[in-house]
Image: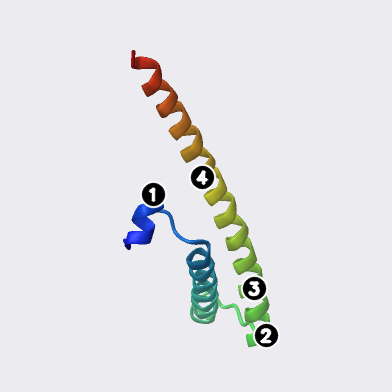
Amino acid sequence: MNAHAEAAGGTQSRRMSLVEAIANVCVGFVVALLTQIIVFPLFGLRVSLGDNLVLGSIFTIASIVRSYTLRRVFETMRLYGTETSTAGHRARRP
């Protein structure tokens, strides 16, 4: 972790979050596409490259929605947990 991240409480900059999100989506799309191309024929499914691209796009959009939703849920839990812990900690002090 760099000094800036440590000074910011271990958080990631918005720019780096964007870079990470874009990289994650791109890698996920390629992995999904390659997996479909390899696995579908094993189950007797013959799908064109165009259809594989469409399916990969649908799976990628679903993944983005899932990832975003979970990130927001965990951020809410983190904030709620921090406030509760902090409030409880302060309440015990004289």
Q: Earlier in the sequence, mark 1 or mark 2?
A: 1
Indicate the secondary structure of the residue bearing disc 2.
helix
Mark 4: give few (<14), some (14-19) or many (20+) Cα within 10 Å: few
Mark 1: give few (<14), some (14-19) or many (20+) Cα within 10 Å: few
Q: Earlier in the sequence, mark 3 or mark 1?
A: 1
Query: Given contact means CB atoms under 8 Å apart, are the residues at marks 4 and 3 in contact?
Result: no
Q: Earlier in the sequence, mark 3 or mark 2?
A: 2
Please tell me the numbered disc located at residue 57: 3
Question: Which three-letter amino acid code belongs to the residue tagged 1?
Answer: Gly
Select label 4 or label 3 by which is in front: 4
> As rendered, which of 46 and 54 lies closer to the eye?
54
Question: Which three-letter amino acid code belongs to the residue tagged 4?
Answer: Glu
Q: Residue at x 55, y 56 (%)?
A: 67
Q: Residue at x 53, y 51 (%)?
A: 71
Question: Which three-letter amino acid code belongs to the residue tagged 2?
Answer: Gly
Please tell me the numbered disc located at residue 9: 1
Select label 4 or label 1 by which is in front: 1
Q: Is residue 13 visible?
A: yes
Please tell me the numbered disc located at residue 50: 2
Give above or below for 5 relative to 19: above
Indicate the secondary structure of the residue bearing disc 1.
loop
Residue 81, quarter of the rendered image: top left
Query: Distance of mark 4 from mark 2, alpha carbons?
Result: 37 Å
Residue 86, quarter of the rendered image: top left
Q: Quadrant of the C terminus?
A: top left
Residue sitting at the far bottom: 49
Q: Is residue 39 visible?
A: no
Query: Distance of mark 1 from mark 2, alpha carbons?
Result: 45 Å
